[in-house]
Amino acid sequence: MKVALITGITGQDGAYLTEFLLEKGYEVHGIKRRSSLFNTDRIDHLITDEHGHKNPRLTNHYGDLTDSTNLIRIIQEVQPDEIYNLGAMSHVKVSFDAPEYVADVDGVGTLRILEAVRLLGLTKKTKIYQASTSELYGLVQEVPQRETTPFYPRSPYAVAKLYGYWITVNYREAYGMFACNGILFNHESPLRGETFVTRKITRGVSQIALGMRDDIALGNLDAKRDWGHAKDYVQAMWLILQQDTPEDFVIATGVTTTVRDFVRMSFAEIGVELAFEGEGVDEVGRVAACTNPEYQLAIGQTVVRVDPTYFRPTEVELLIGDPTKCKEKLKWEPSYDLPALVKDMMQADLSLFKRDAYLLKGGHKVLNYHE
Ligand code: NDP
Ligand code: GDR
């Protein structure tokens, strides 16, 4: 039985990857942080089944990417065949507020994993996947972006990830380790963190449809992203580690879309057509037509506003990846396109909030409810 260790197991990708590896027959270990609130919601159904039986093939260890001694102890105990280093402070905007912490976790944290494997004499046994990112491309140098496109990071997050990228390449070249970067473009899902733009939109649109709020406030509507589904992307992570030789891969759909169009597509899921008017911070999205009798929105109602709080000091305006290499070498094909992704996220959020809407209408308090 192969053994995998996942940092960031409680995150979006950690949850999908755990499910995927368990289905493949792996024994899975995860590193989770101590938190004052429960933080394993995304993987609870994998830890314990519906009859309350604990999964003997899934074990979590308390740890943190800032703590070398703890990482060394866990890796020594687990003796993993594969490590997936997904742990990170992954929010680009927040990284401007906590740049040193992000450098430590996202940059030096990667070094700590590689160095632990080297110190423990596991360089020939343990393969390492590093969660690199399309944010490395930053300011546009070439489109579509591919493995050879020069990097120009535009945030403390991306600069920290640049260190993670190169230290992974360096350990591969210096010590012959099977260490690879997956340069993944944005991938989303119903499990996406609530403050990333796609999830913020699908939650917000669902809450507007259910009468729980009037509008959503967003930042840069012109930004373009190459969005895929996280379920597809974790398969690519695994495929990268199953190759004969360690290499770096771009994982992307090759299609780019503006944030504004993602908003349009999400409203279309509830039968609402939007019209945008105005420019910059004065731009608004209003209801132009509402065809679904279940969701009664008034024509002309403002449902999208622009709030400069969400602008970034330096922005990444355009991301579009070239998936040629991953399609040819990994034989990777995504099963979701953007319309299917939007539908999946909207259906999940509508059903999630239906119960809350019912309780709020009855005057009840809804625990953990955030607009
Ligand atoms: P999430 O933000 O959903 O998950 C991040 C995970 O890292 C969480 O489990 C979090 O724990 C954990 N973590 C945060 N800080 C630390 C720390 N100091 N020590 C240990 N663990 C920590 O991210 P995603 O699942 O979306 O992304 C996974 C990885 O892929 C990240 O490295 C991200 O930067 C990268 N990436 C993501 C892309 C995307 O579009 N989703 C695209 C390209 C790269 P907790 O739950 O306690 O907060
Ligand atoms: P990103 O994702 O920065 O690409 O990083 P995010 O969803 O945060 O932003 C995408 C684009 O949308 C614009 N935007 C907003 N973003 C947020 N979060 N909130 C808003 O209200 C809003 N309005 C507009 C942003 O300016 C940006 O242009 C994600 C993370 O998962 C990283 O960890 C990962 O490395 C990259 O994707 C690939």
Image (cartoon, helix red, strand yellow):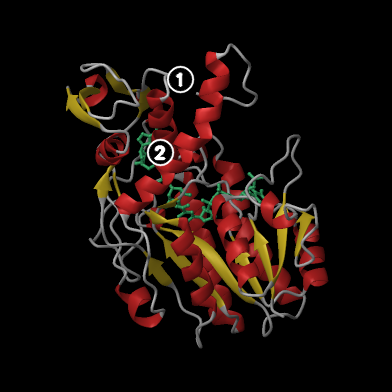
Crowdedness near tag 2: few (<14), some (14–19) or many (≥20) residues, C-alpha within 10 Å = some
What is the total number of numbered labels drawn onto the structure image? Answer: 2
At 83% from the left and 70% from the top, the residue drawn is: 77
- Residue type (three-letter) at the residue carrying disc 2: Val
Q: Is residue 155 above or below residue 30?
A: above
Does residue 195 appear in this view?
A: no
Q: Do the CB atoms of the residues marked 1 and 2 lie less than 8 Å apart?
A: no
Q: Percent x, y for residue 94?
A: 51, 37
Q: Secondary structure at mark 2?
A: helix
Name the side, left or right, on which 16 lies relative to 197.
right
- Residue type (three-letter) at the residue carrying disc 1: Met
**Which residue is nearer to you in this view: 212 or 180?**
212
Q: Which residue is mark 1?
A: 212
Q: Which residue is mark 2?
A: 197
How far, Cα to Cα, is label 1 from label 2?
Answer: 19 Å
Nearer-N-terminus badge (1/2): 2
The residue carrying mark 2 has its beta carbon less than 8 Å from ligand 2: yes
At 78% from the left and 57% from the top, the residue drawn is: 61
Quarter of the image where the N terminus is located: bottom right
Q: Is residue 275 above or below residue 329?
A: above
Q: Percent x, y for residue 179?
A: 56, 75
At 52% from the left and 60% from the top, the residue drawn is: 163
